[in-house]
Amino acid sequence: MRSRRSLWAWLTWRMVALAIAATAAVQAGMWARYSYWEARAESKLPPGIAAEMRRLEAAPEENAKRLQEIYGMYGDLFMPPSETEDLIVQALLSIAIVPFVVVFGLILARRIARPVSHVVAAAESVSIGRFSARAPVLEAAPAELQRLAMHFNKMAQRLEAYDRELHDSSAAIAHELRTPLTAAMGRLQGIVDRVFPFEEGQIATVMDQLEQIQRIIGDLQVLSLAHGGRLQLEITEFAAREFVDERISWATPALRERGVRALNHVAAAQMLRADRTRLGQVLSALLDNAVRYASDGGLVEVDFLAREHGVELIVRDRGTGIASEDDDLSRFFERFWRGEQSRSRHAGGTGLGLSVVQAICKAHGGHACAAARAGGGAEIRICLPYTVKVPEAGKLVT
């Protein structure tokens, strides 16, 4: 459970309590000293006089004359301590309190330093490449120190994800580029060796492989620009229905080839505010994804919802769908990730399309999410804010 106590309040109240306790301890010591002095002076009086004085002191105003006589007779006993003696006693009391103040200060400093030292230890582990290190969030720590540990853990988690993605992507990129490149080189070598005839069909096969490499490189460039906060956006306002119709018309040949119908449910009055070209790239990628993995004769539907804080562009299909497990859904937009059933290398594609979709959505200040549909199929939502803030140059988009 997160603490609601700020570091300022947490530290201030303890310092105030320490000051009050130290002052009260000195005053209590002085009170005890004067009590002892009065008791000692009274013990030196004759028993009868001491008893009479206690009775008279119960009503000092009425018995002032008699009290003055007693004080006059035994004035030496009632002579108060000198200021020098008081200062010496106060100094001794202050010195006696110092060890307790030091102990309390050390406990207080340890309470503050302990969560910071955990973060330092975890940071040292991260600095040497152990990105799995995490700092414990102590419930007794002030709110700022709890947030420090939580934000550090989030940072380490992202670094761990980036590091894992870098290692996985490096191997995947090498494989994805090597496959079409090897096929193109093999085909060209076959033409050179006269195994294949030098004709237009053979050249077209080589061009298909080279275009695949070009698409992979283009997608990687978009991802690199987006993650580095350098993806340029030209924000305009445009009609959503017309925009969807345009992208569906571009995908019509592929839709017809697979026997897939596309339905546009977007109302004519709906408007979108985004980079039309980049958002078109997103919608085309989703339509292409639906065409590749939808069953023959299937249906792709595009819908639009206006929410309180933004809009949603929804693409639904009735394909083989995606697994509903949390792990599959969380990895749906990872680079080169393919599920066992719905994502197959044999279906084509670069394996980067959905990663590009997520990157462009985040560059707009939104996000993409996926869900399995009841009865089979997938539903991908593109969530965009009403006001798109273009990221500053060099700002990391996470």
Image (cartoon, rainbow, N blue to C red):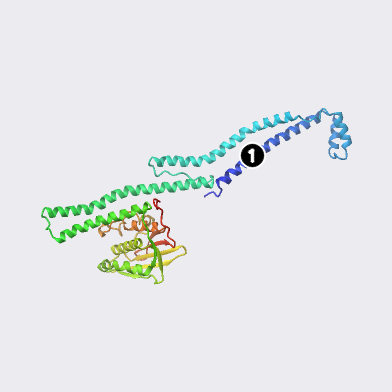
Left/right placement of residue 40 relative to residue 349 reads right
How many marks can you see? 1
Position of 206 compared to 48: left or right? left
105 vs 247: above or below: above
Q: Give the image quarter of residue 319.
A: bottom left
Q: Is residue 24 above or below residue 215?
A: above
Residue occupying image coordinates x 34% and y 49%: 165
The percent coordinates of residue 36 (x first, y second) are 75, 32
Report whether residue 336 is seen: no
Percent x, y of residue 145: 51, 45
Q: Residue 117 placed where, x, y %?
A: 48, 39
Q: Amino acid at mark 1?
A: Ala
Nearer-the-camera pick, 310 or 32: 310
Tell me the residue at 40%/42% (across/down).
Answer: 126
Residue 86 lies in quadrant = top right
Query: Which SS class for mark 1?
Result: helix
Q: Position of residue 186 (x, y in %)?
A: 17, 53
Depth check: 260 or 224 in front? 224
For label 1, count other residues whose C-alpha is less than 10 Å away and answer few (under 14), some (14-19) or many (20+): few
Task: Name the residue tied to disc 1.
Answer: 19
* Location of residue 238 by image quarter: bottom left
